[in-house]
Amino acid sequence: MYEIIEVNAETTYPLRLELLRPNQTLAEMAFPGDRDIHTRHFAAVLKNDLSTLKIENLNPESIYGIVSVYFVENSVIGAQWQIRAMATRAECRGQGLGRLLLNVSEDYCKNNTIIEPSYIWANARVSALAFYYACGYQAVGDIFNIEGVGEHRLIKKPLIKNF
């Protein structure tokens, strides 16, 4: 039903704004690390639409979910892969799309032969913790607030290489 494709950072900004940070501006959707060499951005589109879409300028309405993955330093668990800006449209939730986005992100990290950290982590919204736990993530530390965004918790999952 859905196909996960690699996109540029700017393609994810409209959904970041709409689903994750509606009280901010589109210009504020550019996150540190978006253009780093190892950062990747993924978007979910309908397989039926893929042949008619131009990947370089996707219409935001044709994107049903997004996720970005960065290699960054975390003060608690060290230099590791981070999932950030993960979101799915409300009408797509419960259909496996979030898990599909996570799988693609995790596979990118596992198959990267240049950087070999042992964990993937995220600052997960409290409202999404059950989803991440079901996908094998573990809580690290206490709940904290990101101003203007809401309550989060640091989560991590061991990366087991595919080769």
Image (cartoon, rainbow, N blue to C red):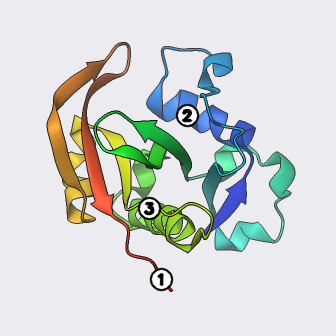
Q: Nearer the viewer, mark 3 or mark 2?
A: 3
- Mark 1–mark 3 CB contact (< 8 Å): no
Count of numbered badges drawn on the protein: 3
- Number of other residues with Cα within 10 Å of mark 1, as a class: few under 14, some 14 to 19, many 20 or more: few
Residue closer to the observer: 114 or 43: 114
Quarter occupied by the N terminus: bottom right
Residue closer to the observer: 73 or 54: 73
Which is nearer the N-term, disc 1 or disc 3?
3
Vertical placement of residue 122 versus 104, above or below: above
Query: Left or right: 79 with respect to 5?
Result: left
Quarter of image, res 44 = bottom right
Q: Position of residue 125 (x, y in %)?
A: 29, 36
Vertical placement of residue 104 versus 141, above or below: below
Mark linked to residue 59 = none
Whether residue 85 can be seen here: no
Task: Write down the residue under mark 3.
Answer: 102
Task: Write down the residue under mark 1.
Answer: 162
Q: Position of residue 42 (x, y in %)?
A: 62, 55
Residue type beneath disc 1: Asn
Residue type beneath disc 3: Leu
Task: Write down the residue under mark 2.
Answer: 16
